[in-house]
Amino acid sequence: MTRRKLIAGNWKMNETKAEGVALASGIAHKYAALNAPSFDVFMAPPFTLLDAVVQATKGSKVWIGGQDCSCFEKGAHTGDVSPVMLKDLGCGGVIVGHSERRADHFETNECVKAKAEAALKVGLGVIICVGETLAQRESGKTLEVVASQIQGSVPTESTAGKVVIAYEPVWAIGTGKIPTTEQVEEVHASIRAELAKLLGKDTADKMQILYGGSVKPSNAAELLSLPDVDGALIGGASLKVDDFWAIAETVM
């Protein structure tokens, strides 16, 4: 089955307002110059830049979203940002369950699932992240860990049009290390099999599964050509227009 590619950038805790607007505008300009692009573009700036980036990309077909959200709609949750607030800013989606949230903020599968459900409820698209640590990889538990994360983090009402899965081996994020293409395809195929158990084969076959973890222009073409890899969730390389676009060009 042919699935549309998605090239997504997670800016993490980077960029000032001026830098963010320049970055977003540069990518949106390149995307707008394409005639009927065969892939989608998503950017997730920090919360402080969302309004400025949404305004800077207004009228383009670039998808802007948050890096996280609360599972609550509103209330006494100091420091949190709700899916309703993201939607109100003009966001179209949100990332949940990134390994840095799971590790630094002790987020469980149940927490990630609740956030995804809350985002879906207000009409946001959701990118749900999964991935194993180096210790889990070395002990041969990768497929078991990822399967548990899929079963525990993905809402049963998920559809291919609204939910995307991102596989990011924790040990490859920002390290320059990446799994072999065989390892990447093995995990992506396993994820699709778990999605089929949870959501049905038809939905699983249509759902996009991204790869993330030290994706850069030099390795993107090989990774994005794999049968079950439907795009990339890019960290560091998403902070430079030329690097991000060089990755995007591999799927044109």
Image (spheres, rainbow, N blue to C red):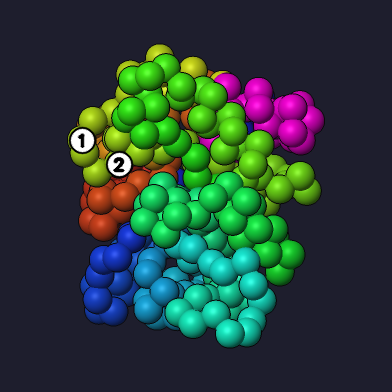
Q: Is residue 8 above or below residue 178?
A: below
Q: Is residue 119 above or below residue 77?
A: above
Residue at (33% x, 60% y) in the render: 11
- Please tell me the numbered disc located at residue 231: none
Q: In the displayed structure, does residue 226 sit left or right of residue 112? A: left
Q: Residue at x 49, y 63 (%)?
A: 68
Query: Which residue carries the number 2 mark?
Result: 173
Q: Quadrant of the C terminus?
A: top left
Report if residue 251 is visible in the image: no
Write down the residue under mark 1. Answer: 176
The image position of residue 4, as x and y in percent, is 58, 38
**Vertical relation: 100 (above or below) 5:** below
**Is residue 208 highlighted in magenta?**
yes
Q: Alpha-carbon neighbours of circle 2 within 10 Å: few (<14), some, or many (≥20)?
A: some
Nearer to me, 112 or 250: 112
Q: Quadrant of residue 91?
A: bottom right
Gap in angstroms between the C-alphas marked 2 and 1: 7 Å
- Residue at 38% x, 19% y is 139
Find numbered disc 1 in the image and state the secondary structure of the residue it sits on.
loop
At mark 2, the secondary structure is loop
Q: What is the three-letter code of the residue carrying label 2?
A: Ile
Q: Front-most of 7 and 70?
A: 70
Q: What's drawn in magenta, residue-wise?
A: 190-210
Please check the rendered image and state whether residue 214 is part of the magenta-colored stretch, yes or no. no
- Residue 115 horizontal/vertical position (percent): 61, 60
